[in-house]
Amino acid sequence: IKYHELDCVINGEYSIKCRRDGNEVFIPFFGFIQKYFEIYGKLSTEDGYERLEWEHSYSTVHRPREKYSPAGVFMSFEYYNVEERDRVRCISAMEGVPLSTQWTQNGHYYPIQISQFGLSHLSKYLTQPEAEVVTLEDGEDELESWILPDKRSQIELRKDPDLSTTLVEFTTSDSLKNPGISLPVDEKEDFVLSADIKFATDGSITVTIDTPGLQLFYIHYVLSSRLIFLDGHDIYYGLGDRRGQWMHITRDIAIDFDKGLALKYNKSKRTKMKLKVSRIKVVIVRGHGWLDNLTLSTTAHLDHFYNAANWLVLHQNDRGGWPISVQRKLIPKVLELEPGWYSAMAQGQAMSLLVRAYLRSHNTKYIQAAVDAMKLFEIPSMQGGVLAKYADRYDWYEEYPTTPSSFVLNGFIYSLFGLYDLKEVTSGEESKMAERLYNKGIESLKHMLLMFDNGSGTFYDLRHITLGIAPNRARWDYHTTHINQLLQLSVMDDSEIFKVTAQRWMDYMKGKRAKHN
Amino acid sequence: IKYHELDCVINGEYSIKCRRDGNEVFIPFFGFIQKYFEIYGKLSTEDGYERLEWEHSYSTVHRPREKYSPAGVFMSFEYYNVEERDRVRCISAMEGVPLSTQWTQNGHYYPIQISQFGLSHLSKYLTQPEAEVVTLEDGEDELESWILPDKRSQIELRKDPDLSTTLVEFTTSDSLKNPGISLPVDEKEDFVLSADIKFATDGSITVTIDTPGLQLFYIHYVLSSRLIFLDGHDIYYGLGDRRGQWMHITRDIAIDFDKGLALKYNKSKRTKMKLKVSRIKVVIVRGHGWLDNLTLSTTAHLDHFYNAANWLVLHQNDRGGWPISVQRKLIPKVLELEPGWYSAMAQGQAMSLLVRAYLRSHNTKYIQAAVDAMKLFEIPSMQGGVLAKYADRYDWYEEYPTTPSSFVLNGFIYSLFGLYDLKEVTSGEESKMAERLYNKGIESLKHMLLMFDNGSGTFYDLRHITLGIAPNRARWDYHTTHINQLLQLSVMDDSEIFKVTAQRWMDYMKGKRAKHN
Ligand SMILES: [Ca+2]
Ligand SMILES: [Ca+2]
């Protein structure tokens, strides 16, 4: 028998063209297998060795560290790059936190995203090499080589009595048409700009950027409450109406540039047009004000971390919550949440962030906010809280506190991590409350965890059980989140169930399945 | 690029040899796909058209009739051939019911198997063409052409005053060495033998069989309590110690022959040796006794049906149950049942059978047994009954009433069918009890059904939830049982959940899966 084409009749329903060679039949991968089974594969010839790389799953498991600390790295969040995500419109220059466009084109401050932004930057800070810092101007000793645009403009060193440091005072027109007082920089590697700055008048700080295609762009940070704006080669970020206030600003210029251009060009277009920062050429100030500690650095993770923590302290309401201002339709007309809902995941992720901010700064405002964030865990979903009950018996903290309940697994476990962090660092009544909530949650999790095991992967939630509808299988990245969480839990709690289940769930990623009878 | 061999690296773990043709890669079906994904396939060239028949599942769904009646066909049990199964040692000649070797080589009377035997025969009776019946001897008018072995032997017509019929009386030696009083038959199609017979002495009835290979065999039905025995070309079945009693015996000679030879040869060997009945040559009686209504027929379904119902009435104990006399290890050392356990499925299947026997015969002993069978549904598994509770809340009737509970789906639904049948035909308190038990069960089922949906198939039970272990996926024949049951339920109860879920579960059999997020 020789190699030839033959039909393969699929479940008696349709035919595909296959190949026969002796007693073996060969089935087309790209034309059939890939879609029928959702297998990922690509032809590769990288090292001169031609092959098909067959992947059952596209996602990666991150094993946690052997020990867990509420002050330390959060899971494997050092791999997260929150601000790079498409659904982050930009990092607000007013508060230094991301604005989400998930579920609404208008954008909203999504506490989960903000906490993850903070936790990822802390985790990067704790795991990455120390940042290189280039000081452009510290106001000490002698003035850097600032260039004045005209004779009426000036810049000079000043002693600041309040701040017990020296800094520079600059005076020039606040018009954006004014070339401004400029400092040539020519920095090719470190693109995170930080500065302490205060304006007496209207004013701005501008960064001039070069790209690989040698197109010049300008990012202007202005005293406006308009978030972000693109006009030709000019990108504007609003610093808010903060005239007369000291501002500590930290901007990832590469991100600010990319988000600005994203207003006009999609990702593939930006890549094609080579629109990325290759060099920071000049830093410019305008108006009348004071400047100190102007630096460029590889990263400024701690600044981002505290920006997130401060945002949480500032925006927590009297219920201890961070209400989410968009409507959320888990299942349209069946499981919906009206604007103003709370999320146990948001509360929990905030706790994890705030506990870390407290342990690092010893500022009690952070721990107080974390403690207050527990209150909603005792309030049922129906009453605007985040507490669901499974079978009238098991407490479950809802990422999406719909009625009926949805029982989203990953959000629940994140909320438990928050409670764990909190119980570890508090004492007295606060610690007891955190411990009680944590223990109840863990008990529920141990009873219900296997309801998410579908024998070849996991379910994202339990909508099939509460609503009697088709199950909602977790895509592979949520599946690996589940595994990462179980591995993390098994560091906190040595119950066999977390280790054994995580191992089986990892096996599922290689195409293994639970046995059938 | 031409057709050539290339490696496919599977999940980074190992390589298989594939074929490349242009931009397509072809994966070996028999060498890889079949096992990796558990797909069933065979090369077929039947009608001159060569093809691979790819089947995602090997099992078939039977749509139920549009109307359901507690007197009618049970599900699609007309397709069941209980006695042909390997795990049936034989049909006892003492009681006319199967003896199971499941879970024990010694064999035991398994009430579920007995009920299914009865229900399948009733269902066949109701759906198949009427049986052909050849009367060999009815004792009326004139004697058939019996051949006497010697001068002392005799056979003659007699009027039986008790039975108000005429019959034959036979007298000859009861020794099996005696050729006996024989009736040439030469029957090539109808192999089910029935007779009314009573022995005054020891005695036997023998059937002489021819096979395609022209080997002669003898099946002897003897007054012994030895179930079955093979010695060379002689097969013995014990009729029990019933001297002096009228017996109505009904034997499927083809089955009796096959089970006899199964004691020595496995199935493939029996097929290879062509050991099957091609002809019934002679019927022989020995000893002193009376005989009437000796027939050969295509089938005798109602006899088998009543044999099963009568067995249930005779062997029900004072708890209303049919204790199962073997140890059952669902999971060794974790979920075990000691001999004497009851099964809600056994109770329910018995109800379905007994209700049908009652509706057909109007004999109240059957309905009374069915009513008594309900009692164990109110007794918790821990106390030897069959009642489990899920989450302290949902009643579940256990096929295997282990502690912790196993929540086997198909057994539970069979038990509901029994309760349904019973509530439909009873009245007063008995009906109220059946209805209460049925309604509670259906309520639980509606809440818990989706826990068995794994997004690409079903689970056999909920051991993963109660024990926190790997789920027990249902193999395809159990999966189709689940579907058949849901389709049957949707005839009894028009809730959307049964129809919609059954449809999705049918889709799973074609490789469709529930969506992922
Ligand atoms: Ca200074
Ligand atoms: Ca007669």
Image (spheres, coloured by chain):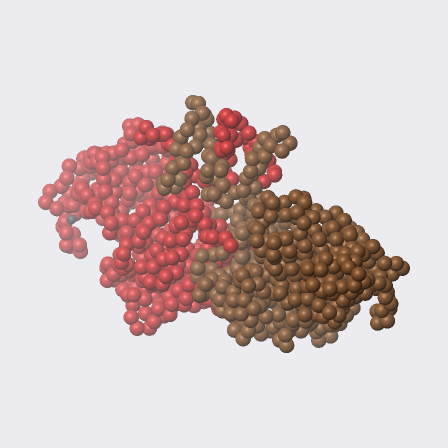
Chain colours: A red, B brown
- In percent of the image, x 19 and y 44: which residue is there? A133
- In percent of the image, x 51 and y 54: which residue is there? A517
Residue B22 versus residue A464 in the image, above or below: above
Q: Nearer the viewer, residue A352 or A364?
A: A352
Residue B277 at what x, y percent from top left? 68, 49
Please indicate whether residue B446 sits to the left or right of residue A502 in the image: right
- Residue B78: in sight, yes or no? no
- Residue B323: in sight, yes or no? yes
Residue B221 at what x, y percent from top left? 69, 61
Please indicate whether residue A49 sits to the left or right of residue B433 in the image: left
Quarter holding residue A363: bottom left
Please indicate whether residue B26 sits to the left or right of residue A424 in the image: right
Residue extending farthest top = B1
- In percent of the image, x 42 and y 59: which residue is there? A412
Q: Nearer the viewer, residue A87 or A390?
A: A390
- In percent of the image, x 43 and y 32: which residue is there? B18
Residue extending farthest bottom = B318
Residue extending farthest right = B141
Q: Nearer the viewer, residue B282 or A464?
A: B282
Residue B361 versus residue B123 in the image, above or below: below
